[in-house]
């Protein structure tokens, strides 16, 4: 049995399409925006090398935008979020207030 590399975690906490909620304020990776704790998002991709991290699309409420949300892609560590729902139950999570008149 080989030892795990230092700093590497093998337990993945969330999988793609899982709905998550941030536990702490998060600074955006591509701007100086601070995203508040309690913001929800969806896991895009988990990484376990060199350490456990998650690419996540966060939905930030913004009533000035059509649909009511702005989105920010960030990298989160496991201690920065909790998983709320599995991917199978997350269809339509980003725009719960938007009523789409077509496709009935």
Image (cartoon, grey):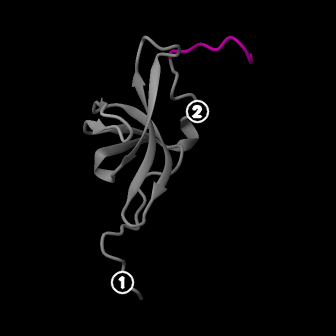
Report the residue marked by disc 2.
Answer: 91
Q: Is residue 69 above or below residue 30?
A: above
Mark 1 surroundings within 10 Å by alpha-carbon count, few (fewer than 14), some (14 through 19), many (20 or more): few
Point 64% across, 14% down: residue:
100
Q: Residue at x 38, y 67 (%)?
A: 50
Q: Marks 2 and 1, how far apart in space?
A: 39 Å
Which of discs 2 and 1 lies nearer the camera? The answer is 1
> Element type at marker 1?
loop
The region drawn magenta spans 97-104
Q: Which residue is more in the foreground, 9 or 104?
A: 9
Mark 1, residue position: 3
100 inside magenta stretch: yes
Q: Residue at x 27, y 33 (%)?
A: 37
Q: With 103 as the anchor, is 96 left or right in this view?
A: left
Residue 72 percent coordinates (x, y): 43, 34
For the residue labelled by badge 2, is the local secondary structure a helix, a strand or a loop?
loop
Instruction: Out of 32 and 50, give the one closest to the viewer.
Output: 32
Residue 58 in the magenta stretch? The answer is no
| Residue 103 screen position, x and y as percent | 74, 18
């Amino acid at each position: 049995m080989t030892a795990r590399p230092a700093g590497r975690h093998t337990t993945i906490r969330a999988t793609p399409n899982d709905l998550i909620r941030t536990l702490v304020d998060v600074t955006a990776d591509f701007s100086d925006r601070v995203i508040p704790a309690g913001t929800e998002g969806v896991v895009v991709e988990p990484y376990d090398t060199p350490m456990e991290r998650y690419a996540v699309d966060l939905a930030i409420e913004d009533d000035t935008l059509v649909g009511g949300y702005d989105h920010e892609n960030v990298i989160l560590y496991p201690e920065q979020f909790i998983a709320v729902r599995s991917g199978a139950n997350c269809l339509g999570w980003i725009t719960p207030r938007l009523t789409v008149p077509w496709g009935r």
